[in-house]
Each structure stands twice: as C-alpha cells, then as structure tokens.
Image (cartoon, rainbow, N blue to C red):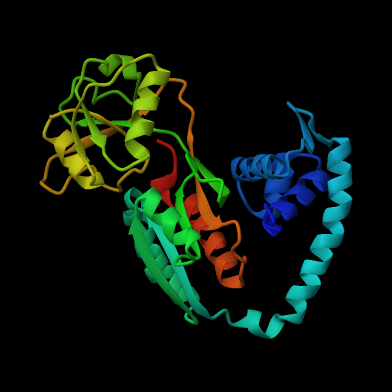
Amino acid sequence: MEIPFTLRQLQYFQAAASSGSLSSAADLMGVTPTALSLALEEFEKRLGLSLLIRRKGRGIILTSDGHRILEKSKHLLSDAVQLMDEASDSRREVSGVLRVGVFTTLAPFFSPPILKDFAAKYPGIDVRVVEGSAQMLHDQLISGQLDLAVQYGFQVSENLFFTPLFEFRPYLLVPAEHRVAALREVSLKQVADDPVIGLNIQPTLQNTRHIYEQVGISPTIIHNTSSFEVARCLVGNDLGVTVLFQRAATTSTYDGTSVVALRLTDSIRPSTLGVVQAMSATETERVRVMVDFVDDLLNTSEIFQPL
C-alpha cells in the first residue's frame, strides 16, 4: 500500500496542534506560515479528512478526526525518530547519488545553487540535475530515473506526491519605455489590448491563458517561445508584454534591452511551487536534505521575494 503523506507533514500537523496557531507552528518548524498552511492543506487532501478548523484571529482547533490522527501520528513519529537514531552512523555523512529534476523555466534559478551550494554542503552526495518539461519530469519520476523534481503544483499527476513549499504571484513584464512602465503596480485590464508573448512550455502557456481569463480578458498571443530569456528579449524589444512568475535579478536582457516588472493588482490565484516524488518512492535522507535546501532557498533568496 502506498503512503500518501510524508513525515514532514506529520511534524507540521503536530506542531500546529500543539501550538494552537499556524504562525506559532511555522516559527517552531522554521518555515513560513504560508508554506506550513499549504503543507497542511495537502495533508488533509491526501487523507481525505478535515483535521483543523481555522478561526481567523483565534488560532486553530482540532476536529474529532484531527484528535484521532494526532494520537496515531505521535506513535508514528516516535517510531520514525527511533529509526533515525538507529541509523545515526549513516546519517552523519549523507552520501550516494541524488537525481533531481527541475522544470525548464525554473532551471536558471535552481540548477546553479543545487550544483554549487548544495554540492558544497553535502560533498558525499553525487547530485545530478535534469531539466525538462512537466511531462518529461513526470515520466522520469514514475520510471525511477529521478528521485524528486522541483516544479509548480498545477496539473501534478495523481501518481505523484507534491509537497508545496512556496506561493508565487504572477507579475507583468513590460518594455522599459512602455506607457505603464513608471507605475509600480497595474491591472491586466490596463494592457488588455497589448499583444502577449507566451511561454510555450506546458502547462505554463495554459496557465498564462487562465490568468488572463480570471480577469475576464482573452489574451492576443502573437508569439510563443520555449525560452524564458527569449520571452524577456521580445518584451524588451517592444513586441509585447508577458506574465511571468520567476523574476530575473537584472532588468537587462541578453540583447541589451531593458524590461520592467510590475506588481499585478488583479485578484489572481497564486501558483504553488514545491517538490514532487513518485508515490512509491522512499523518502531517503538525501531527498530530505534536498527538500530542506529548496525550502530554505525559496524563503531566503531575494529573487523569490514579492515585488
């Protein structure tokens, strides 16, 4: 029987139950309240149960199912801790091959720190990074060619287990000389007639259309590219605007043009980023430290902070 949740989620659930609030539990676990809340929602979804009642300004309380699962989880985590203690020798120096997939548009932001900083922190791990589309990552996770992957949470297969870590809100990228470039924030309705540059990497293109639809606009996509940087170059050359989630550390493009990132005021659902594993995969210590590394990177790097 496949286990549809992780020990990390059990730890988050116990922290929330014992502290009585999501913010206190997040502090206890060293994560953001958003990341903890997303993980708990996924935990409830996987169990098919409502475990917590969230009361605005008054913390949380457990449901009857929540009390029952809490008692069971205490024994389970206790056994897990004992198992980890017994494996302390191998845990002191994590080693072995770790195969990490990264969604194409995320690769410029994750591949370098994984191959440089993570590798320096865990020299015993032979980390190998593969970049690709969501479908390619799915296939390689299912076939066992990858241990985990970093990608967005939309359209994750039921055959995969998604651990949410961070929420991204989309922003609008416009040429430096665009009529709204001097503004800090805009609505998509202000650029409703502007042509759109699309990122033709599924499900990114579909998600872009969905973002416009949430505002009641049908985008006029004049060009699709599979390259994040080509999209920025096309915008810089005043060929259109685009909606993105990742944000480059510079306003300059490859060809020397300039672009401006603007906060969107529209009520648009954020996209969740996290790590994905096959349902049948074992959460090894190598995987655990990689998840911790990605989580820390998302919450400390300036390029992932909101505009």
Classify residue 305 as left or right of residue 14.
Answer: left
Q: Using residue 180 as the reference point, say whether residue 68 is left or right of it.
A: right
Give the quadrant of the N terminus.
bottom right
Say if residue 295 shows up in the picture.
Answer: no
Closest to the observer, 86 or 56: 86
The spot of residue 233 in percent (x, y) is: 16, 41
* Above or below 184: residue 67: below
Which residue appears at 44% of the width and 64% of the height?
A: 100
User: Residue at left 25%, top 45%?
Assistant: 228
Q: Provide residue 52's location: percent of width, then percent of height.
A: 78, 36
28 lies above or below 48: below
The quarter of the rendered structure image containing the C terminus is: top left
Q: Which residue lies at the image location 75% right of the left edge and 48% below the top edge? A: 13
Q: For residue 89, which quarter of the picture?
A: bottom right
The foreground one among 142 and 47 is: 142
x 48%, y 39%: residue = 154
